Image (cartoon, rainbow, N blue to C red):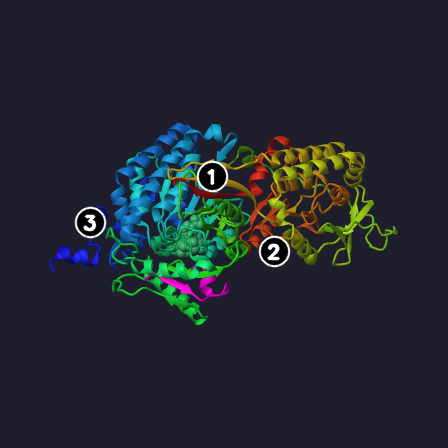
Amino acid sequence: MNKIAQIFETLDYGPAPEGPDQANAWLESHGRAFGHFIDGKWTKPGTTFASDNPATGKTLAQITDGTAEDVDKAVKAARAAFKGWSGLSGYERGKYLYAIARAIQKHARLFAVLETMDNGKPIRESRDIDIPLVARHFYHHAGWAQHLDREFPGHVPYGVCGQIIPWNFPLLMLAWKIAPALAAGNTVILKPAEFTSLTALLFAEICERAGLPKGVVNIVTGAGETGQAIVAHEGIDKIAFTGSTEVGKAIRAATAGSGKGLSLELGGKSPYIVFEDADIDSAIEGLVDAIWFNQGQVCCAGSRLLVQESIEERFITKLKLRMASLRVGDPLDKSVDIGALVAPVQVERIRDLMQRGLAEGAVVYEPDGAIPSVGCFLKPALVTNVSPANTLVAEEIFGPVLVAMSFRTPEEAVALANNTKYGLAATVWSENINLALDIAPKIKAGVVWINGTNNFDAAVGFGGYKESGFGREGGREGMAAYLKPVWEKDLKAATAPKAAAPKFDNPLDNGHLDQTAKMYIGGKQARPDSGYSRAVYGPNGNLVGEVGDGNRKDIRNAVEAARGALSWGNSTAHARAQILYFLAENLDYRRDEFAERIKAQTGKSGTAEVAASVERLFAFAAWADKYDGAVHNPPLRAVAAAMVEPIGVMGIVAGPDLPLLGSIALIAPALAMGNPVVLVPSETAPLSVTDLYQAIETSDVPNGVINIVTGDAASLAKTLAEHDGVDALWFMGSSQASTMVEKASITNVKQTWTSRGLGYDLTDRQKFEGDYFLAKATQIKNVWIPYGA
Ligand code: NDP
C-alpha cells in the first residue's frame, strides 16, 4: 500500500513539526547563560541552574539564581524609576504598553516556540492561546493607562510591586501581572518560576528594545528563596503572587503587619458540571480543553467532572473514545494535543497522588497507545469510583487527570461543586439557559463558564473565592488591585481614646441589680458562655453599665448563626435596602436616648454621631441596589457578566472610639452587599451597640444577619481570624493586633482589612460613604455566556 493510501486507511496525522531554530539562535545570542535584567541592564550570570526542555531532557540555558542582594538592587532600581514612571501621563505610559504589545505580536512565533521548548506545552496552545492573550493584555492595559485619571480619580499606584509567578503559563502570568501594574504607574520586580524563566527574559529584551525607562521592569530569576527575598524586602509596597495555596499562605503570613498590598491567585479544583440536557459532544470537547489543556497544569482546570446520573454511562463511554484519539507527544508538533509536563518532579508528584487515589479505591482508565519514552509525558487519565474524600477528588493534581462523579439533582450538583476548599472556576453545561443561570450564582467560584470552558480575556477579571485566593487580574477590578486611594498614603497613627481609670476594682463593688447587656446571636439575646461580664466606664471612671465578656464559644455560636443566615446574600438588593432604611429610621426615632448613651460613655455630646450613623445607614441602603456589576464584551462569541457578590460571613471588629458610628460605618456596607456579620463593638464603649438590639428586631433584620459579641477586641478578633466559617475580617485596632489578625487569617485565606493602628476617620463621609468598603465587602464573579446559534 502506498503512503497516501495508508493515510486514507488510518486517517492519522502526519508529523507537523515547528522549527526551533529561531529560539535556539536567540538562546545562542545570549551564550545560553542569563543574568538578571535590573535597571535596564543585564547582570553577568551568577550562580546558575539549568533550564531544561521537559520534552527532551536537554538543557536550554543556564539561569542565575537570584540572591537577596540581587533583589535589593532590583528594588532600588524600581524605586528610583518610580517617580518618573508614575509621573508620566497615562497617555505616555499607554504608548509604552502599546509598543510592548506590538513587539510581542511581531515576535509572537519566537515567543511561542521558546515557551513550548521551556515549558513543554503544545505549540498549538502557546501559539494560539498564550501569546495572543499576552499581546491582548498589553493592548487592553495600554487603554487603562490612557484613561486612568478619568476612571480612577483620587487613586495612586502602590509604588514598587514584587511579582511572583508559576511555571504553567510563564509569559501569560507575567503579562497578567506586569501590564496592569505598569498601566497604574507602578514599577516592578518580577520573578519567573525556576523551571520557566526564558520567555520572561525574552520579554525583558523586548522592554529594552521598546525603550522602556530603565528600572521600570526588573526581572530577577531564581527559585523559592529568591521569591522569599522579594516578599521580605521592606522596599516593596505590594506583592502579587500566583502559585500554590501553600506558598500563598506562607506569603500571607510573611507580609502580615507589613502594610504591603497583597493579591493571591492560588490553586483550584474546579467542577465541570454536565446536565442531562447538555449537548454531549460539545461538552466532551469542552472537557478535553478543561482538563487536558496544558497537560492539566492549569489552576482553573475542570478537574472534577460532575455528570448527571441519567447520562453518566453514555457520557463516560464517549469520553473514553475521545481520550483514545488524543495525541501525546512532541510539543513542537502542531498536531499534538498533549505535550510534556514541566519537569520530572512534577511527573513523580502526579504518580504519587495517583497511587494514593488507587489505594483508596479509585479506578483509573488510560487509553491504549504509546507515549514518548524520553521526556516528561503522561497519558490522559480518567478516574472513577471515587468518594468526595478520595485524595484525587480533594487535592489539586495539576496534571492530566480527570476525576468523575455523578449527581442526580441540580441541588446535589451545587453541593458537590462547592464541596472543596477552593473556589477558582466552574463550568456548567446545559442547553437550558434558565438552569445554567440559576446554577452559576450558586457556585462559589470567581469564574463560571456556561457551555464553554477556559475562556480568558484581559477585559474580564479572573481570580478566586475561598482558598483560591483574593484579588482579581484583568478588567477594572484587576486595575483597582494596583491602585490605592491617595489619602491612604498620608494616614497618621491613630490617637487612642484615653481610658478612664475605673472607680471599681472589685467586680462585686458596683452594687447594682444585674443589668448586664447580653450578646445578640441568631436573633436572640444570649448570655456569655463565660458567665462573666465586663464593666463599661464613663470618662470619670464611673460605671455606666456592663456587657458580657465574650469568648471563643460565643464567637463560634455567632458564626454558626451567621452561616445559617447566608441566604441574606440571595435576598434582593431592594429588600436589603428597605431593611437598612428601616433600621436607620428606628435608630433616628430613638436618637436622643442614643446620644445620651454616647455621652455617658465618652463624655462628649453624642448628637452628631447618632445623626451620622443614621445617615450612614441611609447611604448604604441607597447603595444596596446601585453598587452593581457590568457586562463585558470580550473578543470571543460570548458576553461575561461581572456579578458583584457578597463574600460570605464577615467578622467586623470595631475600633475603640465612636461607640455607635464605629460599628455602623463598617456593618452598613457589609450588610448592604449581602454579608451576614459577626460584630465585636467598641471594647471600651460597647453599650451603644448593645442598645441596638431592639431596633434590629423591629427592623425586620432576619435572624442571624447581625450577631453581636462583646468583649476583648483583640482576642475575639483572633478567634474570628482563625475560624474557617468566617470568610472576611475587618479589624480596627493597633498595629500589633492587626498583624496578629493578618497572620491568624491564613487558615482559610480570609480576606482581611485592618487599620494597623492608623487614624481612619470614619466620620469622613467623602472617604467612607462610597465604594471604599463596598469593594472590600464584595467579590466579583464573572459568568461567561456564549452566543451564536
Ligand atoms: P508554587 O507556589 O510552588 O510557586 C509559585 C512561584 O512562587 C514560583 O515562582 C516559586 O518559585 C515561588 N515560590 C516558591 N516558594 C516561595 C516562597 N516561600 N516565597 C515566595 N515565592 C516562592 O506554585 P507552582 O509553581 O508549583 O505553580 C502551580 C500552582 O500555581 C498551582 O497550585 C496552581 O493552581 C497555581 N496557579 C494559580 C493561578 C491562578 O491564577 N489562580 C494560575 C496559575 C497557577 P520556584 O518555582 O522558582 O521555586
State the SS at label 2.
loop
Q: Quadrant of residue 86?
A: top left
Left or right, residue 477 beside residue 352: right
Quadrant location, the C terminus: top left
Q: Which residues are magenta?
A: 379-396
CA–CA distance between discs 1 and 3?
Answer: 39 Å
Task: Rate crowding at label 3 as few (under 14), some (14 to 19) or many (20 or more) other CA atoms within 10 Å.
Answer: few
State the SS at label 1.
loop
**Image spot of residue 388 (x, y percent):** 50, 63
Q: Are marks 1 and 2 in contact (CB under 8 Å)?
A: no
Mark 1 or mark 3: which comes first in sequence?
Answer: 3
Pick the front one: 575 or 328 = 575
Q: Quadrant of residue 784?
A: top left
Q: Is 767 part of what is drawn in magenta?
A: no
Q: Are marks 1 and 3 in contact (CB under 8 Å)?
A: no
**Image spot of residue 709 (x, y percent):** 71, 51
- Of the residues shown, which amino acid type is indicated by label 3? Gly
Residue drawn at (45%, 38%) of the image: 475
- Of the residues shown, which amino acid type is indicated by label 1? Tyr
CA–CA distance between discs 1 and 2?
Answer: 29 Å
CA–CA distance between discs 2 and 3?
Answer: 54 Å
- Of the residues shown, which amino acid type is indicated by label 2? His
Q: Is mark 1 within 8 Å of ligand 1?
A: no
Residue drawn at (28%, 49%) of the image: 124
Q: Which residue is mark 2?
A: 723
